[in-house]
Amino acid sequence: MKIVKVLGAAIGGLVVVAIVLILIARVVGFDPGVTHPGLWVRGEVVKTLPADWTFAKKVPGPTVVQTRDSIIPGLAFSVTTARFVHDGKLYVGSGYPTGKKMPEGRHWNKNIVADPVVRIRIGDKLYDGTLVYVSDPLEHDAVAKEYGPQLWAPGFFIHLWRLEPLA
């Protein structure tokens, strides 16, 4: 009986520690890395999306996409990904090996399918919007042609999402 109490106290302590760590991450942010996801991202929130994203071509650094986790409600899930600008529109890419179906294999893609509202960080600015999957092959190919071999790797397919204003 004593061991059950000790075990219960240990589990309760771990739950409290996990909640405290999540609250700290919510306040200070937890950015994704090149090989690992993050939680909430930090930056200055821009109230309206730009009409023309051409400026984003010149902003150094990675693009971060923050989604709403589809497994744990209220939890953010963020990743670093590639950005593309074509005809003034902003696109983000998600690479898949041939034969892998989208959204399987990418948790952030599953999150977007469940809830397309995202926050994108470019530089130190945050943009809230809705990601729309690019299903039109002509639009996909136009973006791909502009970026050349970066989007034309054998055995690999880049799925594109276009950022649109919140509805």
Image (cartoon, rainbow, N blue to C red):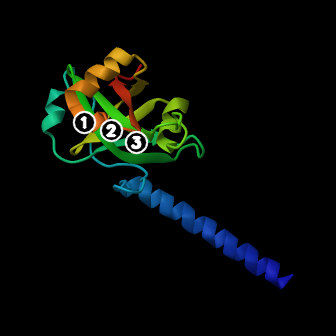
The crowd level at tag 2 (other Cα within 10 Å; few <14, some 14-19, many 20+) is: few
Residue 117 lies left or right of residue 56; in this view the side is right
**Can see residue 122?**
yes
**Can see residue 48?**
no
Instruction: Locate residue 93: give its quadrant.
Output: top left
Image marks 2 and 1: residues in contact by CB distance under 8 Å: yes
Instruction: Locate residue 119: give its quadrant.
Output: top left
Kind of residue at disc 1: Pro
Q: Circle 3 sits in a helix, a strand or a loop, which is it? A: strand
Quadrant placement of the N terminus: bottom right
Of the two numbered discs 2 and 3 in the rendering, the one whose residue sits closer to the viewer: 2
- Check disc 1 and report the residue beneath it: 149
Percent of width and height locating residue 36: 41, 56
Residue drawn at (40%, 26%), measured in percent from left and top? Answer: 130
Q: Is residue 132 above or below residue 23?
A: above
Residue 60 lies left or right of residue 119; in this view the side is left
Q: Residue furthest front?
A: 154
Q: Circle 2 sits in a helix, a strand or a loop, which is it? A: loop
Q: Is residue 92 above or below residue 80?
A: above
Q: Residue furthest right?
A: 1
Instruction: Locate residue 52: give its quadrant.
Output: top left
Kind of residue at disc 3: Gln
The earlier-in-sequence mark between 3 and 1 is: 3
Q: Specify the label residue 112 is tagged with.
A: none
The earlier-in-sequence mark between 2 and 3 is: 3
Q: Circle 1 sits in a helix, a strand or a loop, which is it? A: helix
Percent of width and height locating residue 66: 40, 42
Tell me the distance, in whole angstroms, between the alpha carbons under discs 2 and 1.
6 Å
- Check disc 3 and report the residue beneath it: 66
Kind of residue at disc 2: Ala
